């Protein structure tokens, strides 16, 4: 499964930086696979250490932290433990998975990086730890973490890995040609041949069911159907929820569960703004702000706040009532959460379709590096998403059919000077009257 993020790792390697790379992402999103695939493609080998599952290595660092005689840094300690000659250090990629689970190892890594003194690329000579020391960061280090923490940008480059986008889904399915066709027609605004357009819409429907979590995608490709993906989604979701609750007090763990338990119900309403009263009577922002912030910071949910637009200031977050919407981390998981509850399926087909598409759009925008907002005008007009790019502020509207007429964008354009708007639907590419029509499957091109 080729991931787009490998390009970031290639750039990091080519820069020959003194910095290590820190990759954050929810459990199961593919961080380990990405790291090992990168190591296999660009290094002679790798040393992979998982601090969450390897108690022996954690114990090693705990003992070293309290040993007066220990003078080894983190790399030397690992090389000694795994009996790796130090002269190989520049040719191996060190992958430290879930290092935050071992406080002593995290402290050792920070201490090592703070004491880097040699020029990048300086060779290390000698074969025994007692004869040589690694005093410079000539060793490439990848750190993987399912929990977001602030890292010092003097020592780390960093990025977040998100669920697979539709182009990655196509590549994994052996349909890389389709991805290139989508990109080409996005650049020119020319319609894709109708037969190909319909094929892509069919594949896209599968993507909405499967989502972008690698385990679900892999099963879909292997079994050539979606029969097992709901079970996989359920397992991933429960694992994510359990892992998040473990890091909180009993009280906050309950609040976290309560927020997650009402998200689907919130999204299936006409007004998708998060309402605390649906959690329990008397619930307020003050009660739940910390757990919601934790969920957002760790990419377990995506937050889209109400925004206002001013030509000079751009998009600003509206302070009124702290209005926002919460979306699920993966559209496939959302699809399963909706469909496992038959109450949601009664006479709500169009609302379900719109909710799933909204979540897909939000997920795509976040993966592309946007921080979208939604916009409303005295209940007369609603814009699903506002984004800001090199062209300016762009309103996005999502439609569930080819009829994409709407007054909302016209009202927004009357109030604000915008270069164009984007309407996302099952309609083919087109650009007319300052409106860029974008088929659902082309979101990864934005």
Image: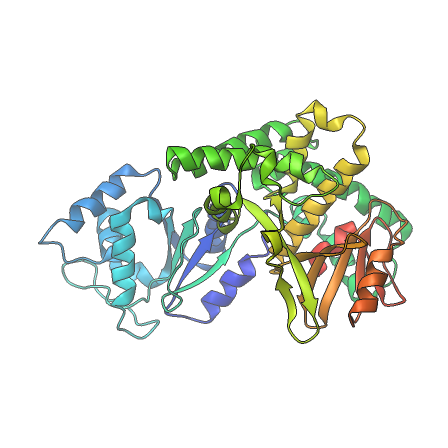
**Looking at the image, is 348 positioned above or below residue 315?**
above
Residue 222 image offset from top left, x and y in percent: 64, 34
403 sits left or right of 274 in the view = right
**Looking at the image, is 89 positioned above or below residue 359?**
below
Q: Which residue is more in the foreground, 208 or 247?
A: 247
Q: Is residue 174 visible?
A: no
Q: Is residue 106 visible?
A: yes
Residue 281 image offset from top left, x and y in percent: 56, 32
Furthest residue to the front? 282
* Quarter holding residue 228: top right
Identified at 38% across, 32% down, the residue is 250
350 sits left or right of 329 in the view = right
Task: Locate the C terminus by quadrant.
Answer: bottom right
Q: Which residue is more in the foreground, 88 or 409?
A: 409
Residue 388 image offset from top left, x and y in percent: 67, 66
Identified at 81% across, 54% down, the residue is 380
**Looking at the image, is 85 positioned above or below residue 294?**
below
Count of marks, rendered view:
0
Residue 260 image offset from top left, x and y in percent: 55, 36
2 sits left or right of 40 in the view = right
Identified at 76% across, 50% down, the residue is 441
Q: Which colouring convention does the figure follow?
A: rainbow
* Quarter holding residue 220: top right
Furthest residue to the left? 69
């Amino acid at each position: 499964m080729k991931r787009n993020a490998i390009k970031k790792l290639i750039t990091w390697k080519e820069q020959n930086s003194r910095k290590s790379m820190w990759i954050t992402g929810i459990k199961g999103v593919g961080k380990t696979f990405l790291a090992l695939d990168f190591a296999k493609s660009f290094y002679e080998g790798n040393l992979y250490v998982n601090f969450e599952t390897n108690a022996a290595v954690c114990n090693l660092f705990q003992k070293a932290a309290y040993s007066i005689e220990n003078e080894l840094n983190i790399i030397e300690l690992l090389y000694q433990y795994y009996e790796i000659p130090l002269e190989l250090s520049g040719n191996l990629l060190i992958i430290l998975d879930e290092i935050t689970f071992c406080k002593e190892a995290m402290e050792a890594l920070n201490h090592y990086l703070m004491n880097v003194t040699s020029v990048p690329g300086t060779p290390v000579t000698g074969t025994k730890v007692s004869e040589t020391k690694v005093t410079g960061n000539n060793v490439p280090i990848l750190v993987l973490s399912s929990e977001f923490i602030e890292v010092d940008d003097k020592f780390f480059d960093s990025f977040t890995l998100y669920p697979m986008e539709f182009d990655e889904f196509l590549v994994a399915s052996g349909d890389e040609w389709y991805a290139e066709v989508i990109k080409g027609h996005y650049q020119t605004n020319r319609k894709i041949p109708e037969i190909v357009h319909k094929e892509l819409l069919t594949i896209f429907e599968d993507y909405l069911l499967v989502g972008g979590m690698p385990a679900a995608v892999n099963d879909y490709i292997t079994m050539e159907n979606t029969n097992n993906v709901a079970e996989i989604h359920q397992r991933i979701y429960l694992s994510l929820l359990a892992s998040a609750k473990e890091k909180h007090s009993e009280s906050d763990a309950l609040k976290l569960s309560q927020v997650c338990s009402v998200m689907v119900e919130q999204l299936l309403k006409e007004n998708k703004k998060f309402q605390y009263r649906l959690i329990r009577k008397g619930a307020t922002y003050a009660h739940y702000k910390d757990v919601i912030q934790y969920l957002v910071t760790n990419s377990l949910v995506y937050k889209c706040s109400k925004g206002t637009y001013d030509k000079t200031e751009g998009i600003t977050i509206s302070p009124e009532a702290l209005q926002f919407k919460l979306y699920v981390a993966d559209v496939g998981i959302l699809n399963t959460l909706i469909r496992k509850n038959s109450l949601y399926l009664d006479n709500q087909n169009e609302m379900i379709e719109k909710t799933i598409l909204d979540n897909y759009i939000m997920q795509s925008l976040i993966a592309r590096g946007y921080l979208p907002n939604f916009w409303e005008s005295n209940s007369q007009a609603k814009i699903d998403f506002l984004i800001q790019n090199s062209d300016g502020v762009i309103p996005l509207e999502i439609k569930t059919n080819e009829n994409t007429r709407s007054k909302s964008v016209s009202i927004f354009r009357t109030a604000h000077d915008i270069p164009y708007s984007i309407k996302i639907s099952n309609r083919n590419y087109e650009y007319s009257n300052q409106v860029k029509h974008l088929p659902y499957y082309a979101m990864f091109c934005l």
